[in-house]
Image: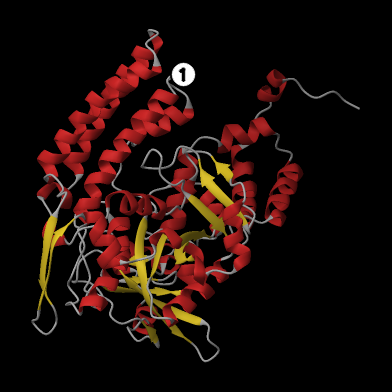
Amino acid sequence: MGSQPSKESRKSVRFDEKRAHASAAAEIQEAYFTANRASTSSQVYLAETLECLGLDDDQVKDRYAPVTAESLTKYSKDFWKEPKNKLALNAVAGHNPTQVLVNRRQAVRENHVFNVKIEPEGSATNQRSSGRCWLFAGTNVLRLAVIQRYHLNDDFELSQSYLFFYDKLEKSNWFLENMIDLAGKDIDDRVVQYLLSDPVSDGGQWDMFVNLVQKYGVVPKSAFPETYSSSNSSRLNWLVVVKLREFATQIRKAMDDGVSTATVRVLKEQMMEEIYRIMVICLGEPPSTFDWEATDKNGKFVGVRGLTPVKFFKEHVKYPIAETMSLINDPRNPYDALYTVSRLGNIVGGNPIRYVNTQAETLKKLAINVLKSGSPVWFGCDVGQYSSSNIAVMDTKIFDYELGFNVSFGLTKKQRLLYGESLMTHAMVFTGVHLDENGSPIRWRVENSWGETSGDHGYWIMSDAWFSEFVYQIVLKKADVPRKLTDLLNTEPTVLPAYDPMGSLA
């Protein structure tokens, strides 16, 4: 057997550019970049073809690793020989591609007719330029109990800013406690850097919402209305984040200098006072007591005096928030198991964030049952995927990218999570579903929090296929969940790393 040529001798072999381009580019690339471009058979064919051509790894690397002038010439030639590309260029270059590529046939099918729909729904709310969707979705669920009990108008709202204030404050404390706990880790530690990258975003998860409501209660929007910074939170976030990162440096230096953890926690109180000051100046100070006054649909006065936020929740909202649970669909991990995420939370001493993982079809079945009973369903999803704000539709077929770009997308839900293509980015509420003659879902009615100007007065449509691919979490009362799933809450959860996509904040 002859010995393997040395690296130097391999490089001295003359590489026939014309032969490689004519044979490899025309034959290999055409075969590989087909509808089955990612299949094992295509990869095997590519390897066998390279072997037949007698090209070793270094020769292929020299030709195909860089973007060469020859490559650019070929790309251009292939582009311009296809007339459809010229039309696509003229249509798309001056417009948002998603507006040009809307699949009209699919859009026409998406109509706001549902044979299962809760009543009342409530008027659509508006989070404006903030990331508070999870708080809006949560309060939109809670407010329905108040609307029904007191026969209020559909535009009644609970204060999202009230919970936003305390969430931001509590997250600041949560972050500083994590910095104390991780002070011994190198500053380049992956978890430390992940926490520093976004110490207190606007987003959150259902169990965080539960923690806030149980500790602080809720108030009507009239008792703590919006301010500029609640509706436009970017500058407030900047102020808080800059201070928290500064405090993190002080904590790490103090502990590196031998200052005790107990002393650092005393110093943390002064840090938290600064955060509180920023919050009050931007949002106002939340009320400890208030009087609630409203009129019902018939113009009748409704009034209760001397309320506290916790008393208002317990006596007038009366939602069994402690008896709810989160179900997720994460195909990366085993189903019928309990999960949590390291370092994820908002209130020190509050409930941990936990989810039971199950199949998407189970999420759908349970959500349908709850909607049929007349109750809404809080859920988390990746809203930016295949969704059109112009027509308020979420549908995997709503944009015809293959027609416009001659490309198709084949990632599975599991692959999107593994490769960073998708995670939970937005929380909304299901208020209806349209079922076929067999009871299978066709489309879902969604209460968004982006105002009333889109869709059906702010309500969107979600196709069932979109649900399968991009809905990651729903929240239900435990009484509406099978015993085999609720029993998993009594098991030890698998702890996912802090940077896992299941820890993303809607």
Q: Determine if residue 332 is in view.
A: no
Q: Position of residue 76 (x, y in %)?
A: 42, 51
Instruction: Specify the color scheme.
Output: secondary structure
Figure check: 76 above or below 172:
below
On the rendered structure, is 20 left or right of 165?
Answer: right
**Which of 10/105 is in front?**
105
- Image quadrant holding the N terminus, namely top right
Q: Which residue is drawn at 18% across and 77% down?
A: 152
* The quadrant where residue 106 appears: bottom left
Figure check: 269 above or below 281:
above
What secondary structure is marked by label 1? loop
* The quadrant where residue 337 appears: bottom right
Q: Which residue is drawn at 28% across and 47% down?
A: 202
Q: Where is residue 170 in the image (x, y as percent from the top left)?
A: 30, 40
Q: Determine if residue 232 is in view.
A: yes
**Which of 55/455 is in front?**
455
The residue positioned farthest toward the bottom in the image shown: 437
On the rendered structure, is 55 left or right of 118?
Answer: right
Question: How many numbered marks have been drawn onto this rendered protein structure?
Answer: 1
- Residue marked by disc 1: 186
Q: Position of residue 272 (x, y in %)?
A: 24, 30
**Circle 1 residues within 10 Å: few <14, some 14–19, many ≥20:** few
Q: Where is residue 386 in the image (x, y as percent from the top left)?
A: 39, 64
The residue positioned farthest toward the right in the image shown: 1
* The quadrant where residue 220 appears: bottom left
**Which of 78/440 is in front?**
440
Q: Residue at x 73, y 50 (%)?
A: 44
Figure check: 5 above or below 130:
above
Q: Which residue is drawn at 45% across and 62% down?
A: 323
Q: What residue type is labelled 1?
A: Asp
The residue positioned farthest toward the front in the image shown: 306
